[in-house]
Image: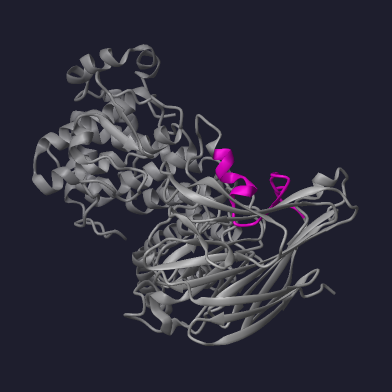
Amino acid sequence: MRSMRFFAAAMALMSVAALVQAREANVDTVSEERMEAVLALLDLSGEELTPVREAWDQSGPRAAMERMLEYFRDRSMTYHFDVDGSLRNLEAIPEAVHDTTPLEDVMEHRFTFEKETVQFEDGIDWTHTIYDPEWAYMFHRHTHLATLVEGWRRSGDEAYMEEFVYQLMEWDRQVEPDHPRRLETGLRLARWVRMFPVAVQADSFSADVLAVYLDNAHAMAESLNDAGFDGYSSGNWGSMEAQGVLQAGVYMPEFEQADVWRDGATERLFHQFMADTHSDGVYKGQSPHYHNVVLSQLSQFYRVLRQIDADFAESAPESFEERVERILDFAGAYTRPDLSLPQFGDSDNRPMGGRLRGLASLFDRPDLRYVGSQGEDGEQPEWRDTLFEEGGFAIFRSSWDDGADQRMLMFDFGPHGRGAFRLLSLDCYAYGRPLISMPGRYRYHTDDDSRQLFRSTPFQNTLSIDGENQQRNPARGLVHYEAEYPDKIVQAWHGGYSHLAGGEEEDAIVHERQVRMVRDRFWLVLDRVTLSEPAPHTYAQNWRFMPTDLASIDGFPGRVTQFDEANIAVIPLVEGPAIREKEGWYSPEYGVRHEAPWLVFEEETGDGWFMATLLLPYPGSAFPLDAMDVEAGQDSVTLTLEWKDGREETVDAAFVEQD
């Protein structure tokens, strides 16, 4: 609870219009009682703060706060960020793509978060929310306040800082410092620390504003750290909460509690990065997008610690440095050759180039610089095909020398994390673009069933049974992995449909998938379903694409995409399944979705199922095959391909049997 909070009850009852009327009267008035309470939160014992103590003794708390303001304006502090650098992109997408509110919109109280816009006509209502609460969450992270500070820094127009002060003081009156969630509190606190050395220089940033700023910063840090080590949230929330506390402790050392915040948050962050990742470095949320959040928090953590202690690694937990390297490995491995992001789980399609280059500099990883610069800088990685067995991902690539024309497949066989029920799904890239893609996350909250659709198993690049979802964390396992040319193989299984058998056996229905990368040019996908007891089920092999059209292929079953630079043919190799095209969606970022094709190979049988599919990528639009011959067995296939350039090759593919 913030100290001496006299307005809380009254403000909760006031209308927004009344708050606007109170703006001029109250924006510059903070009671001396509150100022005194804020000063009591500070350690004023240092010699440099002698003028503050003397002013307090001789003239009272307001005079002391005036001296405190002078102190902060003159204070020399080295930060892990560039104080003279840009806080925000004033036109649109700044630090987080969730916020697309440009400067002039902020001045007019028109706020766009998560692709939803709210216009306040009679002052700002800080308690406002909409059908998707993510809008309010983003609103309370105060990114738009940084936009105002940056607008003033660039232009010198005091009107921007006057608006900053107005919005800050209204927020102070209307809500509590820990509103609406701990996550927003941590992110907001870190942003306040970053804004402070710039904002405090403005004429509009008065002693009254300083008192409110310090009071709330202290309250936010205390609310996050009051329960100590065990009080932080789990997952990436905890790291973002602790990050705010750490930065407040390091960069606002005038607070009496600063050392407690710094040391407690440091201990928690060391723990958090270990607890939130598997031993192979994969974030336990099983989402590349949220693995990027780990990378962002880890980078900030390292920069802050190096700022205050060059030898901080000596105090790190055992194996921490090794875990950091594995976390970085996974980021390099999942980055597509065009620097886009495979969208497993709750993921947006974010560019990775700048992120990888920054990590390369911070952690001395020339291999990440190579990937992030598309081979223009750094050192070619010694790794190429990668297995993250505990995290549950396998990634096959063709040669790094192929550049943007690499063929890359990512296969998910891991535990359930964020988002979709998607075991044994995959993502394919070739010849300059993603070709088979996961659908993305769209929104966390919707006024229709689209969130459920985007999370559903049939909407993923995997096999579904009876249109149902897989269970959340079924029995599963990796059967086989080898990454030796010419055939790279990964094979895994799960019992996520066993509930459809009506019993409690975890392996009553087992789905097994093998993915084989052949000569680094194309892929074969084998699916097998075994039942403990015969029963009729409808099996569907689902394929999802980015927005395009699908077309039939003369002389071949299946469908082919209609992109310009590269395409992929998805060809069933087993007779029997019906070929269906459905209306689907693809979401490149939160709040955005586009119509995209959804291809299904579907069949109803009574005693399990076997399916084999050729995924054939190729550059341009000219389909490269003349003919194809297939011999399919119960759980194997022999495929002979006749290429238009005269080559002929035969591939034998069969399941590797479990021991």
Residue 54's x, y, as percent?
20, 38
Q: Say which residue appears at 25% left-offset and 57% top-offset.
A: 77
Q: Residue furthest left?
A: 156
Name the foreground residue: 299 vs 592.
592
Magenta stretch in the rendered image: 451-474
Q: Name the quadrant of the N terminus.
A: top left
Q: Is 467 placed left or right of 344 in the picture?
A: right
Residue 388's x, y, as percent?
61, 70
Name the foreground residue: 239 vs 386.
386
- Location of residue 565 (image quadrant): bottom left
Q: Is residue 110 magenta?
A: no
Q: Say which residue appears at 62% left-offset and 45% top-offset.
A: 456
Can residue 228 be seen here? The reply is yes
Residue 179's x, y, as percent?
43, 31
Type of colouring = one colour
- Location of residue 592 (image quadrant): top left
Q: Residue furthest front?
A: 555
Name the foreground residue: 60 vs 153.
153
**Whether residue 592 is situated above or below residue 658 in the rendered picture:** above
Q: Say which residue appears at 39% left-offset and 84% top-offset.
A: 379
- Location of residue 400 (image quadrant): bottom left
Name the foreground residue: 67 vs 324.
324
Q: Is 58 placed left or right of 520 in the picture?
A: left
Residue 138's x, y, as percent?
39, 38
Can residue 57 be seen here? The reply is no
Q: Name the quadrant of the C terminus.
A: bottom right
- How many numbered marks does the figure carry? 0
Q: Say which residue appears at 21% left-offset and 52% top-offset.
A: 75
